[in-house]
């Protein structure tokens, strides 16, 4: 019996996009780093993208699996980096460490950009501009 799966890409793209916009509004000084960002980072940025990655895996889409799973784990790791020091579990990462963290995510995203070269221009723009965003965060 064949199981037909829905397209998980909208869930993954919206999960990343909406969470990224909220974090960048925080970075621009519109509001503090609060529970709204943490909740979005864990639930929609993190878990929803991991679910999208698993669904892409079931469809046989290696690129979608790598992208959505990786960026879901990015959001979970970013929440850990921001939240755990406030709980006293770890020291706050240095500015240099965070720069290296964002640089590596930019490098990963730039490499993923090459995987979009035979797809539509919108996806190419998303990955290239996202790489630039990560590098600007360094």
Image (tube, rainbow, N blue to C red):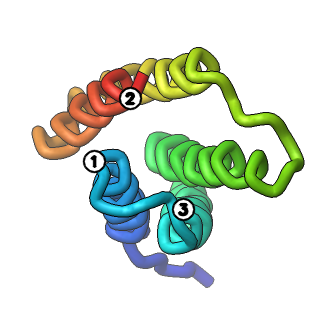
Residue 65, given in percent of the width and then of the height, sits at 54, 49
Q: CA distance from mark 3 to mark 1?
A: 17 Å
Say above or below: 70 vs 38.
Answer: above
Image point 49% across, 65% down: which residue? Answer: 37
Q: CA distance from mark 2 to mark 1?
A: 12 Å
| Residue tagged 3 | 41
Where on the picture, by quarter, is residue 48?
Answer: bottom right
Residue 115, given in percent of the width and then of the height, sits at 35, 29
Give the mark nearest the N terminus, 3 or 1: 1
Residue 8, given in percent of the width and then of the height, sits at 42, 68
What secondary structure is marked by label 2? helix
Mark 3 touches mark 1? (CB < 8 Å): no
Relative to 39, 138 lies left or right: left
| Residue tagged 2 | 137
Give the mark nearest the N terminus, 3 or 2: 3
Mark 3 touches mark 2? (CB < 8 Å): no
The label nearer to you, 2 versus 1, is 1
Where on the picture, by quarter, is residue 116?
Answer: top left
The label nearer to you, 3 versus 2, is 2
The label nearer to you, 3 versus 1, is 1
Q: Quadrant of the C terminus?
A: top left
Image point 47% across, 77% down: which residue? Answer: 5
């Amino acid at each position: 019996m064949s199981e037909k799966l829905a397209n998980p890409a909208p869930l993954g793209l919206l999960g990343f996009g909406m969470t990224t916009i909220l974090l960048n509004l925080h970075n621009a000084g519109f509001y503090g780093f609060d529970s709204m960002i943490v909740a979005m980072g864990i639930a929609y940025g993190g878990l929803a993208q991991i679910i999208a990655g698993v669904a892409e895996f079931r469809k046989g889409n290696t690129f979608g699996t790598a992208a959505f799973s990786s960026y879901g784990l990015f959001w979970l790791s970013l929440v850990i980096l921001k939240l755990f020091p406030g709980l006293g579990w770890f020291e706050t990462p240095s500015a240099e460490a965070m720069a290296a963290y964002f640089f590596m995510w930019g490098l990963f995203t730039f490499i993923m950009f090459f995987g979009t070269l035979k797809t539509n221009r919108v996806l190419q723009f998303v990955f290239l501009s996202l790489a630039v965003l990560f590098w600007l965060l360094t």
